[in-house]
Image: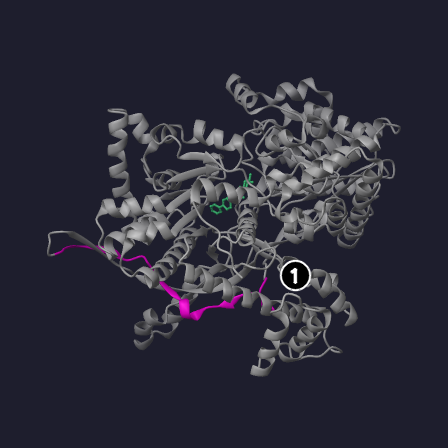
Amino acid sequence: MNAKANAFARQSLSDVKLNKSEIKDTVVRHLHCTLGTDENKANNHAWWKATSAAVQELVLEGLRKTQKTHYLNDTRAVHYFSAEFLMGRLLSNNLHNFGLFEKTNQALNELGVSLSDILEEEPDMALGNGGLGRLAACFIDSLATMELPAIGYGIHYEHGLFRQEIKSGVQIERPDSWRDYGNPWEICRPESIQEVSLYGYVETKYGENGRIQKEWHPGSIVKGVPWDIPVVGYGGNTVNVLRLWQSESSDYFNWDVFNAGGYIDAQRENVQAETISKVLYPNDETEAGKELRLIQQYFFCACSLKDIIRRYKRAHGDDWSRFTDQVVIQLNDTHPAIAIPELMRILVDRAELDWDDAWAICTETFAYTNHTLLPEALERWPARMLEKILPRHLEIIYEINHRFMAEVEKKWPGDNAVKAKLSIIEEGADKMVRMGNLSVIGSFAVNGVAEIHSKLVKQNLFPEFNELWPGKLTNVTNGITPRRWLKACNPKLSSLIDSKIGDDWPTNLSKLEQLAEFADNARFQKQFMQVKQENKQELADEVKALTGIDIDPKAIFDIQIKRLHEYKRQHLNLLHIMTLYRRLLENPDYDMHPRVFLFGAKAAPGYKLAKDIIYAINQVAERINNDKRVNHKLKVVFMPNYRVSLAEKMIPAADVSEQISTAGKEASGTGNMKLALNGAVTIGTLDGANIEIAEEVGDDNIFIFGLTVDEVHALKFKGYNPYDYYYQNKEIKAVLDWLETDYFTPGKPGALASVKQSLLDGGDPYLVLADFEAYCKAQTDLDAAYREPKRWAKMAIMNTAKMGKFTSDRSITDYVERIWKLSSCHVD
Ligand code: 26Q
């Protein structure tokens, strides 16, 4: 961009009171000067890029001001370390947060362009699997909105979560290429490149004062190139950053190989280095133990710590005494736990601090969020692997453990069982490093993500740690940003709410409670349900376009959207659908309101049964949707490639929110909050945040069913036999046997047998059959409620009205007050 254009940009877009014609001029200028095209030639993609570039001018202005303000005020900041940030699309969000959405819509209209069409051109930034990654994205939105000094640190994956295609009912994974045609938001910062060491060996030396010195001689060095994604707060004052590291080969390291004539070897090194940030691992809730995954984790933690320390030293030089005043690091699960020994290495080996001083700094710097109780999801790394990749870190972990074991001995003298349990090292043929234990020991605070989950973390996962350090384990219930998950995704409901209670609810979500006054008001009920109806019509059009399936917008839209996992029990939903189908076949007059069941879910590529469940859903859908006897009452839709931007279309149209995990297994859930906020009624178990949602909306406005956590434990303890339910309940037997025939897979009997098998001989680990009857009963009650329009409208309104607690602003306030001890910093 030339200097004149730049000056023009400042005069125009930097003034938030931008008018329409200035927006038009800026977008057109970018069409010409950035995209090299013009109004006549430009397609929607070019218009999207030009509009984004125009908005980016404002973003960068805000970013510059924010960074200057934070620097001048020498603010304490939170550093959110996460292997995943599921950002989704940014243009609509940034326009809303700057308050420019409507004006830009009009400006583009006058240029003959539809804003809603060009928004569809933006690829999702899918640098995450599901809940954990999206939580990180909601949190950085709240941090910027609340003008808190914060930075997100993660990995600049070349390929985000795979794109899902469904071919003949089967999930096919395709690479995601979100940056193929350039990303208008990210800024490369070569001036802040960091180098990271890997492999090699450790040399022990003796310093002059007799102090043992360890020197790590790395076998390989890679470069971390930072890409900054600006994060615009609502209101547009504070613009924080998400800094994502991309790996590259280090020129410095390859020079020798290259000079020695090893061009090919040098190239191989290049490829290996670049592999580190190539692809996001798609296995949520399972520990894969792959070497590359560990290298990814260390890579981004090491880059981020160097970045933090560089910034700290710029202000405080070599004086470490103020480090913990300035820096707090939140670990999003154990994925970044290797940062703990890395900071120890920097402090002890590089800064030459005494161990105890270094450890004091470390344990005042880190806090850790746990997101799971599933044993298969708790990260453990083979000590041998750590030794090879990070030899010095393994030594440090042993030292941390050695000193910690002495503490345990003091508290529980002679108790070897408790030592074995609390040790960071799991002994055995192959020693394993337990990242959960390391994280608890190396942090000053540990939190679960919903009341019940945190209680179980204290009681079942880490009871001895809770005894050793009372108060360290705590709860911060998750939340979601109402800017994306109501204001931006549901403009019709947002306007209706504005008209009733004013427009400051996006930053003060408990104001929604005022809607409760109108829950019985016939006129408001009508308006509310009219909005829902229009959203359902829009989704029906989308379903038709994406899948070719016709659905009736007057039917109940019953939605289950989340990663596919046995514990989330999509197959419980499926068994109920098959039960309704059977009832309808047996009795064509079976009394029910027409219902459309919609699913969105990706399965980890290596999770066979999860993929089988997707196949089963699709095959049952195919049969039901084409069965004239029932398809006026029952439809099933599997929406391919579930992702943030699809969630934004489905959630506003939901009547029913399926939250049916086995009690004790879903740490919190956040989709439950998004759906309820948009007026969907939950059918769910007493699990995760469902419990707190039920407390907020009241028993009349939610359908709770099934075993509680205590009942699950009791049943497992007494010995659970799924065959008891199979033989006792005719409908269970009928639908499970049905799965084994070729009714849903013509010519291929047994193609769905694995689902049945897992629920019988497989032992039904998630108690699907035990909860089946209660689930069906709750579904029948729900159907009856829907058929009383006034009752249903009230329930839907009450759900929206009572979601104030679940704004991520409240979660962040909890973190700030109880863990981070941060102050906001106003940016003018
Ligand atoms: C681990 C090892 C190797 C490869 C991948 C992974 C991996 C990746 C992602 C393990 C777990 C995840 C993601 C977990 C997750 O999303 N958990 C969810 O977190 C939400 C936010 O707290 C909760 O609401 C959900 O209940 C929880 O399931």
For the point 77% across and 36% down, which residue is it? 518
Q: Quadrant of residue 555?
A: top right
Q: How many numbered discs sit on the rendered protein?
A: 1
Q: Can the viewer see residue 401?
A: yes
x and y percent of residue 219 in the render?
30, 61
Q: Amino acid at mark 1?
A: Leu
**What range is drawn magenta here?**
178-207
Across and down, in percent, residue 92 comes to 66, 59
Above-or-below relation of 207 to 372:
below
Q: Is residue 430 left or right of residue 244?
A: left
Above-or-below relation of 718 to 120: above
Horizontal and vertical percent position of residue 213:
18, 54
812 and 152: which is toward the camera? 812
Residue wearing tag 1: 95
- Tell me what residue is drawn at x 68 percent, y 62 percent: 100
Q: Is residue 184 visible?
A: no
